[in-house]
């Protein structure tokens, strides 16, 4: 039986852009805020809401909430400027979205990104019409790996969590799916397969959507 709903993370899952996020954070942290982080150091901290990333790197007392909001937008503007010329869906994804759409399988975005970035992706790619629900960082109290993001998405789609399949690219994202009682397909755009060894809810690993597994997923 095909899944009753598809839940997609955004960055690294619909588009291959995580290196651009890392680059934008690294520029902000090291060149403006005086940190001395390596690429690998920062990569470990890049999950959850933007203010949470700032707190993990600099501690809870460095910035006010208003300062973190300003830094967050500054970072996202830098990311968008750098990534826009390269913005495209992962290979094979458009076909999967269209098949699901034709089969009336509801789909949602469940991302820790702020609406500013979600809108940037969906509207520039003209794919907003595929998604019946969007859950952003602004819609949850608890960030991934807390299951709130995906549980809200399933509720909005009126589908039981166990009937959903999640598409993610990070161990924390796949753990979120596990915590929500959902199976997960991992796009290996950002992390390697062995980084997910502690999870038993993974159905498949793939670098993109252009293979036979996805062609058979919705049959």
Image: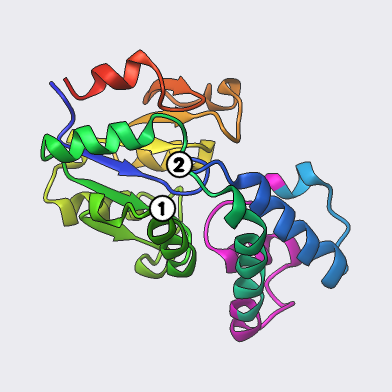
Question: What sort of colour scheme is used for the picture?
Answer: rainbow
The structure residue drawn at horizontal position 44% and vertical position 36%, both measured from the top left corner, is 174
> Where is mark 1, residue-wise?
125
Q: Is residue 58 magenta?
A: yes
**Badges 2 and 1: C-beta atoms under 8 Å apart?**
yes
Along the viewing direction, whichever of 172 and 186 lies nearer the viewer? 186
Q: Distance between the residues labelled 2 and 1?
A: 8 Å
Quarter of the rendering occupied by the C terminus: top left
Disc 2 on helix, strand or loop?
loop
Numbered label tally: 2
Residue 142 visible from this viewpoint: no
| 10 Å crowding of disc 1: few (<14), some (14-19), many (20+) | few
**Magenta stretch holds residue 72:** no
Q: Give the range drawn in magenta.
A: 43-69
Could you say whether the residue bearing mark 1 is in a helix, strand or loop? helix
- Front position in the image: 96 or 61: 96
Tag 2: Cα neighbours inside 10 Å, few (<14), some, or many (≥20)?
some
Q: Is residue 153 left or right of residue 71?
A: left
Which is more toward the observer, 94 or 7?
Answer: 94
Where residue 52 appears, x then y in whole percent?
59, 64
Q: Image point 68% across, 60% down: which residue? A: 56
Q: Which of marks 2 and 1 is nearer the N terminus?
A: 2
Q: Where residue 124 appears, x then y in whole percent?
A: 43, 58
Toward the top, the furthest residue is: 212
Q: Name the residue under label 2.
A: 89
> At which x and y percent is residue 143?
45, 58
Q: Residue at x 48, y 60 (%)?
A: 113
Task: Give above or below for 35 relative to 16.
Answer: below
Residue at the image point whose x is 71% and y is 59% from the top: 24
């Amino acid at each position: 039986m095909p899944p009753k709903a598809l839940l997609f993370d955004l960055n690294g899952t619909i588009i291959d852009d995580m290196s651009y996020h890392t680059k934008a954070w690294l520029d902000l942290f090291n060149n403006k805020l005086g940190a001395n982080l390596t690429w690998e150091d920062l990569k470990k901290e890049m999950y959850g809401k933007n203010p949470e990333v700032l707190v993990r790197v600099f501690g809870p007392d460095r910035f006010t909430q208003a300062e973190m909001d300003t830094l967050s937008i500054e970072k996202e503007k830098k990311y968008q400027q750098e990534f826009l010329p390269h913005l495209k869906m992962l290979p094979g994804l458009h076909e999967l979205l269209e098949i699901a759409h034709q089969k009336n399988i509801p789909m949602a975005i469940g991302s820790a990104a702020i609406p500013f970035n979600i809108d940037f992706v969906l509207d520039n790619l003209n794919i907003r019409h595929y998604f019946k629900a969007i859950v952003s960082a602004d819609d949850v109290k608890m960030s991934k790996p807390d299951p709130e993001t995906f549980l809200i998405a399933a509720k909005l789609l009126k589908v039981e969590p166990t009937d959903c399949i999640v598409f993610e690219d990070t161990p924390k994202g796949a753990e979120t799916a596990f915590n929500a009682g959902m199976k997960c397909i991992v796009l290996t755009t950002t992390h390697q397969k062995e980084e997910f060894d502690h999870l038993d809810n993974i159905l498949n690993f793939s670098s993109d959507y252009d293979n036979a597994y996805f062609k058979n997923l919705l049959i």
